[in-house]
Image: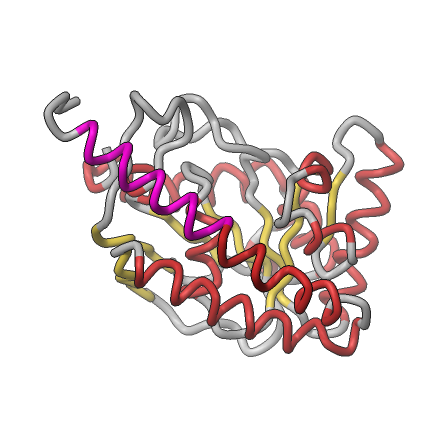
Amino acid sequence: MNLVLQPLRVLWKVWFLLHFAGTMIILYPLFYLLLSSKKRFKFTFNLMRAWSLQLLSICGVIMKVDQRGELPAGPFIICPNHGSYLDIITMYRVFKRYFIFMGKAEILEWPLFGIFFSKGMNISVNRQSNRGSHEALKKAESELRKGHNIVIFPEGTIPPTAPKMRSFKNGAFKLSLEQSIPILPVTFVNNWRRLQAGAALRVLGGPGYSNVIIHPPVYPKDYENKDVVKMKKDIFEIIEKPLRDGKGY
């Protein structure tokens, strides 16, 4: 790591955090009002897209999206790697079509951002409870039947080894095979360089391109006997390849 540049990285991260928190505090009453009705969830989603655009623009993060296949006409499950807190924000710039996040229950305790889960716009998953996980999957099935796309980070959290990925959990792939819903693999190539998780004084951060690859969809019909293990392995390799080829680390 270039120690000469690190003070500038820290300053950029402070600026990013202040702008993130400041704009969220200003918009919080509006979000609270909008999220009081499910009918306004899609309007809230579009407001989140506008918010993410101004946040990324003013902080110097430029989206560069490489879409390598046609998106499915119906609902799909978006499976991205998770190497940075920036992944959630940039996701709103990658996809225009309405989607719902599935995230760990701990997000409910996050200041400001937790409201998008506590109010029911997104789905929280209690991974410490089989019943909680089952209820979350049932909610996801219901949203898919409505034609809504679901975002599931199959790693479950940001691994300490990011951008190297950790093993995937089964949830997204079981949901895909049981509901016959295609999976759309996504690689966040270098978000970890833009805003790396960890101690602010040591880790990477700064403006620049956020490179994202949307891979061709993977369809459940191609997996006999609903082979979760094979589907999980195939999608892991698809997402990892741009990172392994040296474009991410």
Q: Which residue is at 32% across, 65% downward?
A: 68
| Residue 179 image point, x, y percent | 73, 59
Q: Which residue is at 63% across, 54% downward?
A: 101
Q: Is residue 30 above or below residue 179?
A: below
Residue 225 appearing in the image: no
Q: How is the image coloured?
A: secondary structure
Q: Is residue 229 above or below residue 33?
A: above
Q: Is 223 or 87 nearer to us in this picture?
A: 87
Q: Is residue 145 above or below residue 127?
A: below
In magenta segment, residue 13 = yes
| Residue 95 image point, x, y percent | 46, 68
In magenta segment, residue 62 = no
Q: Which residue is at 36% across, 27% downward?
A: 200
Q: Quadrant of residue 42?
A: bottom right
Residue 192 appearing in the image: yes
Left or right of 46 in this view: 134: right
Left or right of 145 in this view: 182: left
Can you say which quadrant of the picture contains the N terminus? top left
Q: Quadrant of residue 219?
A: bottom right
Q: Is 245 or 203 nearer to us in this picture?
A: 203
Residue range corresponding to the magenta coloring? 6-21
Can you say which quadrant of the picture contains the C terminus? top left
- Residue extending furthest right? 131
Q: Total label count? A: 0
Q: Which residue is at 83% across, 53% downward?
A: 138
| Residue 5 image point, x, y percent | 14, 30
Main SS, magenta residues: helix
Left or right of 172 in this view: 124: right
Q: Is 25 or 232 nearer to us in this picture?
A: 25
| Residue 23 image point, x, y percent | 50, 58
